[in-house]
């Protein structure tokens, strides 16, 4: 089945130790999103890639970076995790067809739960 | 900017009873509307969406929602719930735009707990 895969499902890191979360998709979608979801809160968009174009949200901290080496993979790098970065990180994809406005459905992965010790 | 309000943070309901989860939105432009469900420690799954046309939208797992433009609402309903419907439900909007933004704006979520 075509799907969005996130690895690992659970990640534990130490305060200040860089960590990378991985997302891959078999949907061949051209847009990939990273969301941060803290406990009992709505997902908050960090950034997204439209093909190779990177789009950062204005309030995303510099501590968060992303890479998209090809269509299928996207990585979230947290350079120096703090205790406040403990959260569920969700990857989502959609396919955008040109400039025509569509109700693009976003398909979510299962998430990676990050714990910072 | 658009915003989404989910009026109830927690909704307990007995099994086989009907349920309505409320969602109101605010936007100066037209929007698309979505409901997602999130089971514990999992990602979000699309339940249904409204893009245009009939204001009554049917989704998976027996859920439906009605778009009411005058009241700027998109309430989610199910006539008879099961224990397995226990989950967090998120309402989301996206503006109808050809721009590059296109991101979803989520409500704060409603925890539906179905009691035996």
Image (cartoon, coloured by chain):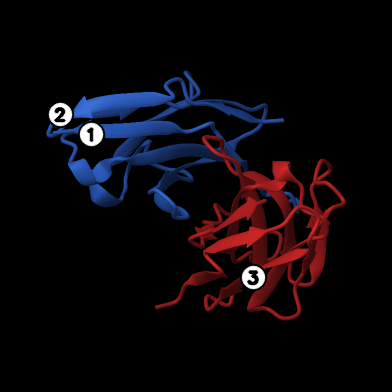
Q: Chain of mark 3?
A: A
Image side of residue B109 versus residue B111, left or right: right
- What tint does the image give chain A? red
Q: Is residue B98 above or below residue A68?
A: above
Image side of residue B43 versus residue A98, left or right: left
Q: Which residue corresponds to the image point at 52% horizontal and 64% vertical from the top-left?
A: A9
Asked whether the viewer can see residue B35, the reply is: yes
Q: Is residue B25 above or below residue B54?
A: above
Asked whether the viewer can see residue B78, the reply is: no
Residue B95 placement (x, y as % from top left): 64, 41
Q: In what element is the residue under mark 2? A: loop
Distance between mark 1 and mark 3 Cα atoms: 34 Å
Find residue B22 and name its label: none
Foreground: disc 2 or disc 1: 1
Specify which label sits upstream in the sequence, 2 or 1: 2
Q: Are marks 2 and 1 in contact (CB under 8 Å)?
A: no
Q: State the residue position of label 2.
A: B17
Q: Is residue A83 above or below residue A108?
A: above
Neighbor class of circle 2 (other Cα within 10 Å; few <14, some 14-19, many 20+) is few
Q: Which residue corresponds to the image point at 29% horizontal and 51% vertical from the top-left?
A: B60
Q: State the residue position of label 3.
A: A22
Distance between mark 2 and mark 1 Cα atoms: 9 Å
- What tint does the image give chain B? blue
């Amino acid at each position: 089945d075509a799907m969005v895969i996130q690895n690992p499902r659970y990640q534990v890191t130490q305060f200040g130790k860089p960590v990378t979360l991985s997302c891959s998709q078999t949907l061949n979608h051209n847009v990939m999103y990273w969301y941060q979801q803290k406990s009992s809160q709505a997902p908050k968009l960090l950034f997204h890639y439209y093909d190779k174009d990177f789009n950062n949200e204005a309030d995303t901290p510099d501590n968060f970076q992303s890479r998209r080496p090809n269509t299928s993979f996207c990585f979230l790098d947290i350079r120096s995790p703090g205790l406040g970065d403990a959260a569920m990180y969700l990857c989502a994809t959609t396919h955008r067809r040109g400039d025509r406005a569509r109700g693009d459905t976003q398909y979510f992965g299962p998430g990676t739960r990050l714990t910072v010790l | 900017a658009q915003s989404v309000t989910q009026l109830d943070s927690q909704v307990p309901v007995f099994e086989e009873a009907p349920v309505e989860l409320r969602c109101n939105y605010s936007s100066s432009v037209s929007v698309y509307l979505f409901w997602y469900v999130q089971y514990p420690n999992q990602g979000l799954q699309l339940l249904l969406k409204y893009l245009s046309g009939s204001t009554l939208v049917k989704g998976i797992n027996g859920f439906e929602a009605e778009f009411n433009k005058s009241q700027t609402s998109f309430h989610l309903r199910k006539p008879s719930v099961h224990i397995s419907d226990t989950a967090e439900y998120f309402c989301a909007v996206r503006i109808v735009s050809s721009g590059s933004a296109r991101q979803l704006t989520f409500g704060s979520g409603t925890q539906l707990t179905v009691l035996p």
